[in-house]
Image (cartoon, helix red, strand yellow):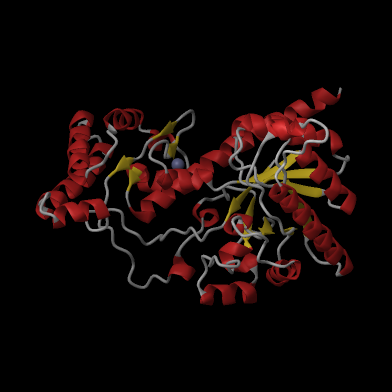
Amino acid sequence: MQFFFPDSQDLVDPSFDFETEKRSETRIRQRDDLYAHEVFVKPPYDGMLVSKAIVEGTGASTGRYTLGQQRRFSVEGVKEFLRIPKGMKVMGDCGAFTYVKEPTPPVSVDDVIRFYVDAGFDIGASVDHIILAYKPEWDFNIPGIDTVPEDCRQRQELTLELAREFIGKCRKGKLPFEPLGIAQGWSPKSYARAVSALQKMGFSYIALGGMVPLKSVEILQVLEAVSPRLSGSTRLHLFGVSRLDHIEEFSKRGVVSFDSTSPLTQAFKEDHDNYYGTDRRYSAIRVPQVDVNVQLKNRILSGEVKQGDAFRLESGCLEALQLFDKKRYQRERLIELLIEYQHLYGGKRNYAAEYDEILRDKPWKECKCEVCQTIGIHVVIFRGAERNRRRGFHNVFVTHQRLKKIRSKITRSTPSQEN
Ligand SMILES: [Zn+2]
């Protein structure tokens, strides 16, 4: 079971000083900043997923890469650009989520093939169009009454047509990457039909798209319907899904790989569970920057909060956290201080109980990853990209470690099942 990590240009600056919050003056972002696979001794994932939409943009959406970066990407190729470790595979896709609202994909098969070939991808996904509904009950229509909306059928048909064109061109041109066919559906049976069709076209690696909003039990229902149709050599990929609790069940039903950004984004896009411990997740400790936090800036401008008080509490919290990490500050006093700052910046959620848990367990002290070992308590402070992204990298590391454990369990149990 391989974990592909999606690139969205998330890098950290190794020159960032956590005490002074200053950077090296000679730092050049693209040259000096580090990807997650450069931060850890061993990469915290097995491969990377790069979307054409993130690099070049698609249709109305612009990419994350500057024009200069795009140029360098196409000259150097994906592996040199992302400084991918030797042997690590890179998968490419269109990034269908960016054009989900458009009637048809704004990218052509020739466009994506050019993108994959020029940049030297190992695996290239066909062009797809996400279906926005998931209704298993549509599998049980009364004969003669069809409740499946036309739009769903059209998107599935279009995705299959584009896959047929894609694999035809890959074969004809003997292209140097493995084609990955994408199946879209709205129910277990409709996914199974799409997978069968893709197999007939000649795909032996098939991705199930549109799974992100589905509950784990729904994903399993789809896999239940799909797996009996798989021929011996067909492998499955799950787009945007990392449900480690179900990986064993996924694996039994033909899934060999998945990708997900959620371990990274959970670190800074959610209001809880931002730091992955070994057995549980913790909320990170909020110390927003006075001069960046919009809410706090407004409160200062309106005279509600004195700027001097804000700065004093902000630096007081940071100092106390660092002293606490050196066992020179009491937990209760630290929480009081953090909550006082929370009142001042107008935090809506009261984190006192959550802060008590994380400060009591000190999970960053137990973690063996390079981030926690190097920056200590800063990894659990919710503040600015350098800390938040590193916490995300730590989560990716923890996810991969957990996956590796599950993997060894799967390999150990496979021979006994065959006997
Ligand atoms: Zn860690």
Instruction: Tell me if I can see residue 329 in this picture.
Output: no
Q: In the picture provided, is 288 more to the left or to the right than 193? A: left
Where, by quadrant of the figure, is residue 290 drawn?
bottom left
Residue 84 position within the rendered picture, expressed as x and y whole percent measured from the top left: 61, 60
Give the residue drawn at x 41%, y 43%: 372
Q: Position of residue 379 (x, y in %)?
A: 37, 45
In the visual, does 404 lie left or right of 171? left
Q: What quarter of the picture does the C terminus occupy?
A: top right
Q: Quadrant of residue 168?
A: bottom right
How many marks can you see? 0
Give the quadrant of the N terminus.
Answer: top right
Say which residue appears at 79% left-offset and 37% top-offset.
226
Of the pair 301 and 343, the residue shown nearer to us: 301
**Which residue lies at the image location 85% right of the left edge and 37% below the top edge?**
229
Residue that lies at the very extreme toward the front in this rendered image: 144
Q: Quadrant of ligand 1?
A: top left
Q: Nearer the viewer, residue 163 or 372?
A: 163
Q: Quarter-wise, where is residue 376 in the image? A: top left
User: x and y percent of residue 95 in the render?
Assistant: 62, 58
| Up/down of 273 relative to 28, above or below | above
Q: Residue at x 34, y 32 (%)?
A: 358
Residue 144 coordinates in the image, percent (x, y)? 82, 36
